[in-house]
Amino acid sequence: MLAIDNLHANIGGTPILDGLSLQVNAGEIHAIMGPNGAGKSTLSYVLGGRPNYEVTQGSVTFNGQDLLALAPHQRAAAGLFLGFQYPVEIPGVSNVQFLREALNAQRRSRGEAPLSAGDFLKLAREKAALLRFDMEMLKRNVNVGFSGGEKKRAEMVHMGILDPLFAVLDETDSGLDIDALRVVGEGINNIMRRPDKAVLLITHYQRLLDYVEPDYVHILSKGRIVTTGGPELAVRLENEGYEAVAA
């Protein structure tokens, strides 16, 4: 589904990714872990198409398409979802308004009929219930006045409504207490653990992987993947640290 080959990228002229290669097949969940500055968030931004992140070498193919040739909205329409480490606030725009416009824009790009207001609200209630998220909060402005945990749970509701093929989740576990972590983990499993979907889960800690068991765990260091293993690699990393595991 996603094939990254020898990817090099920089921000402001500073090299960050240095020959990163990775393949994620449909039905798989991959976790990427690594120390600060390893390039984890840069990878997510490059995949999402954030401006000012320059790819200098390599390729990224998504379902047979050249992902790097697509604008961010085209990547979203193709089925890519990016969950942010720090979800932004959008004053003056309600979650319901934002999500209905986003979903219908994607449906139109695929030649599908837009959802009516009634059908959209029915879908939104279903997905909010899945994440135990109060529907009234979806009527509020996007992330305005939300706690860190509420922002992350709201983002998972966004993912459920948009129903992507591939989700890149950048430190979705940050800012979550124990209960919210379990709810978000269950939400990722319910929404994305499907034979036609895949997830790239970026995290610092093993704790989220207690709820979302990955097929593969990759250690990213100095802009490239240096070690790959199964879920046990994350446990070892938690116990021994990056220096021992990535050596």
Image: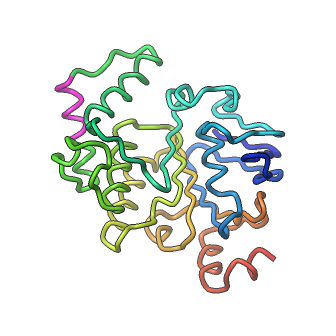
- The number of numbered discs placed on residues in the rendered structure image is 0
Side of 90 where 170 appears, left or right? right
Residue 190's x, y, as percent? 37, 51
Give the residue at x 55% y 56%: 201
Q: Quadrant of the N terminus?
A: top right
Give the residue at x 24% y 29%: 120
Side of 60 where 179 appears, left or right? left
Main SS class of the magenta portion in the image: helix
Residue 5's x, y, as percent? 79, 43
Residue 113's x, y, as percent? 34, 15
What is the image's colouring? rainbow
Give the residue at x 79% y 45%: 7
Quadrant position of residue 238: bottom right
Check if residue 102 falls in the magenta segment.
Answer: no
Give the residue at x 21% y 27%: 119
Side of 121 where 10 appears, left or right? right
Location of residue 165 with respect to 69 vertically, above or below: below
Q: Nearer the viewer, residue 214 or 81?
A: 81
Quadrant position of residue 160: top left
Location of residue 90 with respect to 77 vertically, above or below: below
Stretch in magenta: 117-124
Check if residue 121 falls in the magenta segment.
Answer: yes
